[in-house]
């Protein structure tokens, strides 16, 4: 860099008519440097040192997340915000961009499906606080492959009934059904993979598929990345929704907040892969979905029970009354996922209760046992002479 003395030399030699190339040779610089100095009218101004960035205290944290293969800038931004980062997203993206060349390549090739063709589904588990207690929330995430619009639902377990309920709620959220549903071999959907690539699906899952008009598909074993669109949304939910909301009053409160967040944030984001607002892309996909069936699929539990001599049936550690005429008979018990219990004798619903915890005591409807009490209170009438006769012999 030229100093003040060098510039004074340039000025003096140039005033005497010395060629610029000769001045440059004397000073050991390029002729363009001499020309710029004369045009500038002075030595170059020293550059100020780099100003500190709001991101500086968090660079190590960002590098750690990148090392863990977390490259989504929004996800990283949310993590930093949770730890007090006051800066914006643009600074973070500028920092991450030149590092993407270091990202390890992946062997899976992304493919796109046409609108209305496919939905990918999978479960994930998230630890959070529910009704004041730490709880493992099981989340079913269902993603439309074309638009990337997704829906999720929190449940206490990942069994078949909750799997089917989660799918149906997503169909209702989207307002229609795709041509096929791709699952990750959960037992609620897939029983086994047979030779020749034949998949044996769960009979009840096939029943659900028949009623809603979709074709069931299964990932090849050990190839869950086939449904990578859904896997990425699981990470998005964990890094956004469960970071923003950490405590829930109940299951209903959790799922209410989930749908609010889906409408206000997830649907309105610009998807990084397709470069479009998710809701706008879904608007093109919605007309390609099949309509919902006229009747909703029944996702309740059905169990067979034998009525006791006292006209109660035992369900999940508690006892519930039924009409006394059914004592000793077999009945079917329907347990809805919302905790509503119904007892059926044949096709007739003969009793209804709200499912109760074992410690809360038996559930009794007085009308059920009127006939039973009538039989119990029927006392044989005897004349007093019988007792007098007994007294004489004693």
Image: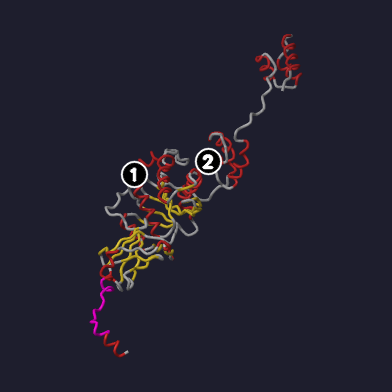
Q: Circle 1 sits on which residue? A: 286
Q: Position of residue 352 (x, y in %)?
A: 30, 61
Q: Is residue 240 visible?
A: yes
Q: Pointers 2 and 1 in contact (CB under 8 A)?
A: no
For the point 31% across and 54% down, the residue is: 213
Q: Secondary structure at mark 2?
A: helix
- Crowd tier of the residue under label 2, counting other residues whose Cα lies within 10 Å: few below 14, some 14–19, many 20 or above: some
Q: Quadrant of the N terminus?
A: top right
Q: Is residue 155 found left or right of 312 in the rendered image?
A: right
Q: Secondary structure at mark 1?
A: helix
Q: Is residue 165 above or below residue 148?
A: below
**Does the magenta run of residues contain 195?**
no
Q: Is residue 35 found left or right of 279 in the rendered image?
A: right
Q: Quadrant of the C terminus?
A: bottom left
Asked whether 381 or 260 is in front, the reply is: 381
Q: Which residues are magenta?
A: 374-387
Q: Position of residue 102 (x, y in %)?
A: 60, 43
Asked whether 207 or 138 is in front, the reply is: 138
Q: Circle 2 sits on which residue? A: 78
- Crowd tier of the residue under label 1, counting other residues whose Cα lies within 10 Å: few below 14, some 14–19, many 20 or above: some
* Quadrant in which residue 161 is drawn: bottom left
For marks 2 and 1, give the CA distance.
30 Å
Q: Is residue 325 visible?
A: no
Q: How is the image coloured?
A: secondary structure
Q: Is residue 21 found left or right of 345 in the rendered image?
A: right
């Amino acid at each position: 860099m030229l100093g003040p003395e060098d510039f004074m030399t340039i000025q003096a030699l140039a005033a005497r008519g010395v060629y610029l190339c000769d001045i440059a040779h004397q000073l050991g610089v390029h002729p363009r440097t001499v020309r710029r100095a004369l045009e500038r009218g002075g030595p170059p101004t020293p550059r100020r040192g780099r100003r500190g960035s709001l991101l500086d205290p968090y660079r190590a944290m960002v590098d750690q997340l990148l090392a863990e293969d977390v490259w989504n800038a929004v996800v990283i931004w949310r993590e930093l915000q949770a730890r007090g980062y006051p800066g914006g997203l643009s600074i973070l993206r500028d920092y991450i961009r030149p590092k993407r060349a270091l990202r390890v390549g992946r062997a899976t090739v992304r493919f796109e499906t046409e609108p209305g063709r496919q939905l990918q589904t999978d479960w994930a588990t998230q630890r959070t606080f529910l009704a004041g207690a730490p709880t493992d929330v099981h989340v079913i995430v269902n993603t439309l492959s074309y638009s990337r619009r997704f829906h999720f639902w929190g449940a206490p377990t990942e069994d078949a009934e909750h799997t089917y309920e989660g799918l149906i709620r997503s169909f209702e959220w989207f307002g229609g059904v795709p041509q096929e549903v791709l699952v990750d071999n959960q037992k609620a959907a897939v029983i086994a993979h047979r030779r020749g690539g034949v998949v044996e699906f769960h009979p009840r899952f096939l029943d659900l598929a028949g009623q809603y008009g979709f074709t069931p598909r299964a990932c090849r074993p050990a190839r869950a990345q086939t449904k990578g669109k859904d896997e990425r949304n699981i990470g998005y939910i964990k890094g956004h929704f469960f970071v923003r909301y950490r405590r829930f009053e109940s299951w209903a409160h959790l799922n209410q907040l989930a749908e609010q967040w889906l409408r206000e944030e997830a649907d309105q984001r610009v998807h990084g892969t397709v470069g479009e607002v998710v809701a706008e892309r879904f608007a093109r996909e919605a007309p390609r979905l099949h309509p919902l069936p006229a009747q909703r699929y029944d996702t309740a539990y059905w169990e067979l029970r034998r009525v006791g001599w006292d006209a109660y049936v035992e369900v999940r550690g508690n006892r519930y009354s039924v009409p006394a005429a059914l004592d000793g008979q077999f009945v079917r018990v329907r347990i809805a996922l919302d905790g509503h219990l119904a007892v059926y004798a044949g096709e007739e619903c003969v009793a209804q209760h709200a499912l109760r915890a074992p410690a809360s005591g038996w559930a009794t409807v007085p009308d059920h046992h009127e006939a039973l009490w009538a039989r119990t209170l029927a006392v044989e009438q005897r004349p007093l002479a019988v007792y007098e006769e007994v007294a004489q012999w004693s």
